[in-house]
Image: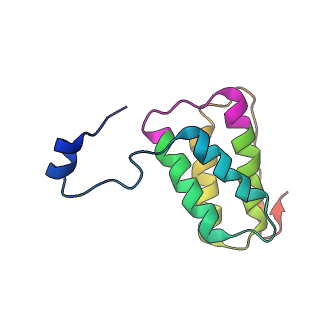
Amino acid sequence: MKKFDKKNEKSSGGSNPFQHLEKSAILQEARVFNETPVSPRKGAHILTKILYLINHGEHLGTMEATQAFFAVTKLFQSNDLTLHQMCYLTIKEMSCIEEDVIIVTSSSGGGIQ
């Protein structure tokens, strides 16, 4: 996992808004996925944070990954296509973590089928 310090921050031209994310805080935020109606904007923002953590070497335990996976699938209740794409990306990245094989076969605006 690459760490940035103040010197690197100045040379890169700005700060990274995701630099100081905490895994536990993001997983707590994912509880928003259970809300009805689903907020595509909130959902996409939290999925972006989850993807950032995963792609920067943050380890999700099996239990954390499983809970996050099922929370993400609830976002398919939205009709927002961009949110669906973010869900697919997140599920794809999480598939490397999961010990159990979970298959999403299809999706429509009404949810996972």
- For the question of whether residue 104 can be seen, the reply is no
Q: Percent from the top left, x then y, of residue 14? A: 24, 58
Q: Residue at x 51, y 41 (%)?
A: 22
Q: Is residue 101 above or below residue 43?
A: above
Asked whether 73 or 6 is in front, the reply is 6
Q: Which corner quadrant of the image does residue 69 belong to?
A: top right
Q: How is the image coloured?
A: rainbow
The C terminus lies in quadrant: bottom right
Q: Percent from the top left, x then y, of residue 106? A: 76, 56
Q: Percent from the top left, x then y, of residue 73? A: 75, 53
Q: Percent from the top left, x then y, of residue 25? A: 59, 45
Residue stretch in magenta: 54-66
Q: Residue at x 25, y 39 (%)?
A: 5
Q: Is residue 40 left or right of residue 11?
A: right
- For the question of whether residue 38 can be seen, the reply is yes
Q: Is residue 11 above or below residue 82?
A: above
Q: Is residue 82 magenta?
A: no
Asked whether 12 or 96 is in front, the reply is 12
Question: How many labels were placed on the picture?
Answer: 0
Q: Residue at x 38, y 46 (%)?
A: 19
Q: Is residue 78 left or right of residue 55?
A: right
The N terminus lies in quadrant: top left
Q: Residue at x 76, y 38 (%)?
A: 102
Q: Which corner quadrant of the image does residue 27 belong to?
A: top right
Q: Is residue 63 magenta?
A: yes
